Amino acid sequence: MSNKILVVDDDDALREMVGLVLNAAGYQTVFAADGLSAVEVFKKEDPDLVLLDIMLPGQSGIEVCKQLRVLSGTPIVMLTAKGDTEDVVFGLEAGADDYVVKPHNGAELLARIKARLRPVAEDGGIITVGELTMDPRSYEVKRAGVRISLTPLEFKLLHTLAVKPQQVFSREMLLEQVWGYQYKADTRLVNVHVQRLRSKVEEDPENPKIVTTVRGHGYRAGNDTP
Amino acid sequence: MISLLRRSLTARTVFATVTLSAIALATLGGFLSFSLANNFFQNRLSQVLSETERAVSSVQGTVAAASLADETALQTLINSVVPSLEVSGVSGARQVALLRSPGQPQLQLFQSPISQDLDLATIPGELREAVRASDGVLTYTSVSLVREGLIVPGITVGAPITLPLAGDFELYLVFDLGPEQQALATVQRALAVGGVVLLVVISLVSYFVTRTIVKPVEQAASVAESLSEGQLDVRLPEKGADVMAVLARSFNKMANSLQQQIQQLDSLSRMQRRFVSDVSHELRTPMTTIKLAGEVIFGNRDKLDPSLSRSAELMQNQISRFEELLADLLEISRYDAGAVTADLELHDLNAVVGAAIASIEPLAKSKQTEIQVRLPAGNVEAEFDAKRIERLLRNLLSNAVEHGEGRPIVVEVGSNAQAVAVCVTDQGVGMTKQQLERIFDRFWRADPARQRSVGGTGLGLAISKEDAILHRGWLQVWSKPNRGSSFRLTLPNNANAVIANSPLPLPPRTMEG
């Protein structure tokens, strides 16, 4: 069964072209040309991934991103013409998993999509981190029996850290292992998503106990001093 | 004290006023005191002279009127007349002496009458000679008298007198100027006290006057200071119609027009940034479509006939070139709009240089160019934007490969207390002085006729220069025709460091001589 991708872009030519590239790579595609219809198509088609242009007429991509995040944890990859501006951070904070800067080539785009559609964790065992239990088969995270809803990316981020609780992960290591980047990428991806993850799993996000910062090095799971 | 004078305009003005006033007052006081003393003396002198004249004529008259039989009678007469001179007259105490001139016949009995407490030292010999030579005119001199243990000024007046039976004598009167001296001292004291009081008053007045003038000036200075610090809405109060008010009004006018222009520039810059952002989006979206379409066609070129296949290749190359040009144009316009900020973080320059070399390696291989690297041991750490610095180094390296004629390229890294540096040197065609002057200009090429294999947009070095400036660093070039070119980038260690000198020499050691 091939994955279904929702392409949201107001530029007709680009939308069609991206569709051609995705089809050639074996994906099914559905389309939306603006923010309002994007949410409707999403509800109707239930895609496996959303390619979302940030600059949309009417409702901005960032707004669409927030609304989609309320509905589900489906991977969202932003398309942006402005890689070095605040827009990227806003989009990530709104819940986008990753972003691609225009003009991008097909390989780049497909690599991002493939990384996001990969299974979250191969290892089947239930693990615990702090007061949390993680079940990679059902993607469930529970605190004292209460379910916490994480997106697949957030689950993968926490799982990657939790599997090796003694190891400190640098941002670059996380970019490679969680996002699937083979080369240097934007470390803001890690910073923003660690914040989002903490806001969901920490009892006090200001004083994190599950995903802790190791100053000057990166992050690790738990706060027990090695 | 000196630093206070240097710092405070008020202190300086008051000090100058008081000093000059003190000099003026001292001169005036000195003059007054001198002319008063002179006046006192002259008055007293004329009084003294007329009294002496009266005394002399009274003695002579008395002696002439009396019929003197012998020395005893003369003695009796003189003894009665001369001491009476001590008290007569209005000018207070005086002393009298009737002295016999030398060279006269010695008298047996006659005694010259002399006031009891008269010190003969007050009748100097020069005066006596002058009196004898004076031929009846009064002669005087100033002398010092001792009165109650104090030395006071005095005048001794003398006149020759001829006594029957006894011959030539000299009559001396010694006058005491003590009262005049006292009066003068009183006046001088009064002058001194008055002068000091006046000086205090002048200093206070000058202080207050200076304050009223300096205060608005100080206010203007502090407002100008705030203005230069960027608080564009500070203004001076405009009161009255004097010169300070005029200053305040013109100052405020200047501040207004400054504020207006800055706001205008600000909005222009905002507009340009907005434009860049819009153009960026507008151009990038069709560019993406073209790029993706080009890739699809290029990927399937073996299904096309040869001429279509070659066209696909050409198109693919030109799309990349177009994309690079677009990226560079957007980058330089971001700099022009002031919309670029450096993402400063601590990095190892050695690592960044290594990454740049690795990415340029395929190009170097294709031109059979060796890259020799001279890195110092350990980390060369500094705060910089690694993305921009790596791009800058890639640009320097690809230029070196393009112009290096296949000869080895040397990359050297160094560091000192304030800065780190990297120097990229080729041994290629080099540049002339005229070419060097334009090397960082946009779209400028050293040799337009030269065949370009690497391409490049013509904006590379201009952007590199901007990147160096963004880091408050230096990008410098040395070149000689047929010897080669050397580009040296020097970056401060951190945002607060100021580069004093670069850790690496330019031209590099390999190029010396």
Image (cartoon, coloured by chain):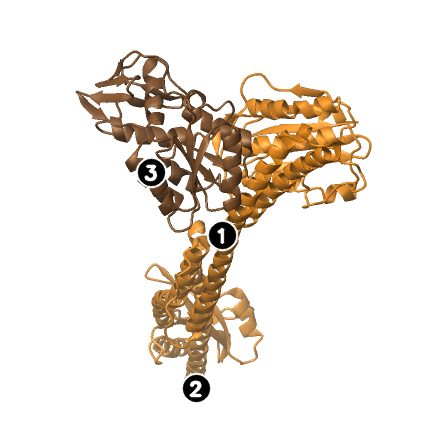
Chain colours: A brown, B orange
Give the residue drawn at x 57%, y 45%: B330
Residue B426 visible in the picture: yes
How far, Cα to Cα, is label 2 from label 3?
Answer: 158 Å
| Mark 2, other Cα within 10 Å: few <14 / some 14–19 / many ≥20 | few
Does residue B76 sit above or below B296 in this rendering? below
Identify the residue position indicated by label 1 in the image: B274
Residue A78 placement (x, y as % from top left): 43, 37
Mark 2 in CB contact with mark 3 (< 8 angstroms): no
Give the residue drawn at x 39%, y 64%: B235
Does residue B96 sit above or below A23 in this rendering? below
Q: Is residue B88 left or right of residue B282?
A: left
Q: Quick one: which residue is furthest to the bottom in this view? A: B65
Name the mark nearer the viewer: 1 or 2: 1
Q: Is residue B158 left or right of residue A141?
A: right
Q: Secondary structure at mark 3?
A: helix
The answer for which chain carries disc 2 is: B
Residue A3 placement (x, y as % from top left): 42, 27
Looking at the picture, tell me which residue is in the foreground, A191 or B279.
Answer: B279
Labels 2 and 3 in the same subunit: no
Identify the residue position indicated by label 2 in the image: B61
| Mark 3, other Cα within 10 Å: few <14 / some 14–19 / many ≥20 | few
Mark 1 in CB contact with mark 3 (< 8 angstroms): no
How far, Cα to Cα, is label 1 from label 2?
Answer: 125 Å
How far, Cα to Cα, is label 1 from label 3?
Answer: 37 Å
Q: Amino acid at mark 2?
A: Gly
Residue B240 placement (x, y as % from top left): 37, 76
**Quadrant in the picture for residue A116:** top left
Q: Secondary structure at mark 2?
A: helix
Identify the residue position indicated by label 3 in the image: A44
